[in-house]
Amino acid sequence: MTSNRLTGFVRKKGYPFLCVHAAKKTGVEQDSNIIFVGLKRSPFSFKMDEDLRYDPFFQRHERLVRRELEKFRPDVIHITGLNDVSIMGALLAWKMDVALIGSWHTNLHEYAARRLRKLLRFLPSKQLNSFTDFLEQKIFEGAALYYKMPQIILAPNQELIDQLEKRTGRTAHLMIRGVDTELFSPEKRTVDDDITRFGFVGRLRAEKNVRMLADLEERLLKAGKTKIKFLIVGEGDERGWLEKNMKTAEFTGFLQGEQLSEAYANMDVFVFPSETDAYGNVPQEAMASGVPALVTDKGGPKFIVIDGETGFICKDQDEFAARCIQLIDDPERLSKMKDLSLEFARNRSWDSVFEDVYRAYAETKEFLDNKKKLRKEK
C-alpha cells in the first residue's frame, strides 16, 4: 500500500521513477514518468502470507534489471524490506555503486515467533516461549545485518529507529504513513442505531493476536453489555476459530475501496490487539473515519494513538475490556474522542510523508558522493 502511494506521488509530481516489482508476467512498461519493470516469480516460489510469495531463484532476472537501471541511471535505489525484489536491488546497488536507502515495513522477527508459537503450542509454554524468544532475537539480528547495506534507513517508529541505529551503525529517519482522508471518512457511515460496534481490520493471523477479540466480547457480554457487535474485516487461518467462538461478530472477509471505507465508518471503536505491527496503518485509517482506536503498549501503533484523546493504549486484556466498557457507558466521551481522532488524521497527508522521503533520498546520495570523493582522494 505504501509503495503504491509512493508511485502515485511521483506520478503527480512528474519525477522520473523506475519501479521494479513482482508481476504475473515479465515485462517493461512506460507509464508517463514512471517505468515499471515487472518480474515473474518461478514455480519454486513459496507462500509467505495471503498474497505474498518469495522466489529463491529471483536473481535470474538480474541481467534484465541491470540493463534497465543502466538506461535509467538512478541517483538512489530504494529497497523496502527483506524480500526477493529488494535483495536483488541491494546487490545491484552494491555492484553498480549506486546510493541505497532501505525502509523497514514489517516486523518479520515478531511475526515468525508468533506463528511458531501457534504451530508448536503443544509444547510446554516455558520451553516454547524461551525457544521462540531466542528465534525472534536471531531473526532480528539477521535483518539488522541486511540493513547495514543501505547508507540511510527509514523506520516507522522511534523504537525501531533506536534499535536499527544501534545494530547497524547507520543513520535512521522516521518514515510515518499517511492516510487518505477522502477515502476514509465518517461521512461513509450507513448505520444509525443504539448498537456499539467494535471493529478490527487486518490479517486474521496469530501474529495479530486476534483471539483476544473473542475474549473481549465474552468479557463485555458478562458485564451485561449486550447492545454490541463486532465487525471483523480480513482473512486468515484464524477466521474459523473466531467464527466458532464469537457470538456477535460479523465477518466480511477482505474488503478494499469504498466497501472498506464504509466498514470503518460503521464502527464506533476500533480494537487492534496486535503486538507486532511496525506502524499500524489500520488504526490511522480508523481515526480518519472518526473512530478512536484501542491499541496495545507494544509495537508501532502506540505512537499513533494519543492516550485518552484519540483512543487508549492498553497494557493487557483487562484494560482493553475496561476501556470498552467505559466508552459504552460514556457516549459523550466517545463522541469527543471521535472528533479528536478525525482532527488528528487530517494532519497526516501522504504528500508530506513522501516529501520527507525525497529529502532522505538526497541525503543518501550526498552520503555516497562524499564517500566516493574520499576514495578518490586516497
Image (tube, grey):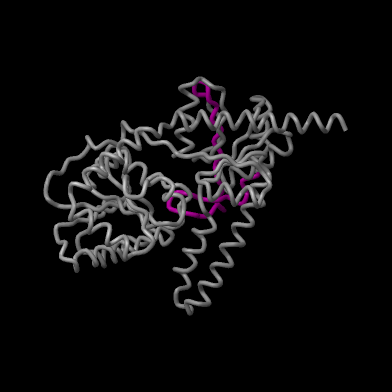
- Residue 26 at x, y percent in the picture: 55, 36
Q: Which residues are magenta?
A: 30-59
Q: Is residue 286 left or right of residue 15?
A: left
To which quarter of the image does residue 235 belong? Answer: bottom left
In the image, residue 220 lies at what x, y percent? 22, 63
The answer to whether residue 246 is above or below residue 157 is below
Judging depth in this view, the residue of 17 and 301 nearest the camera is: 301
Nearer to the camera, 60 or 117? 117
- Magenta stretch contains residue 38: yes
Residue at 48% across / 33% down in the picture?
Answer: 353
Furthest residue in direction bottom, as rendered: 124
Q: Nearer the viewer, residue 107 or 24?
A: 107
- Looking at the image, the residue that sits furthest to the right is 378
Q: Quadrant of residue 369?
A: top right
| Residue 22 position in % (x across, y down) | 53, 41
- Give the residue at x 27% y 36%: 185
Quarter of the figure that contains the N terminus = top left
Which image quarter is the C terminus in? top right
- Residue 24 in the image, given as x and y percentages of width and height: 49, 40
Task: Report the residue at 13% width, 44% height from top.
Answer: 192
* Image-quadrant location for residue 73: top right
Q: Is residue 357 magenta?
A: no
As drawn, 37 above or below 241: above
Q: Is residue 296 left or right of residue 31?
A: left
Residue 372 shown left or right of residue 321 in the figure: right
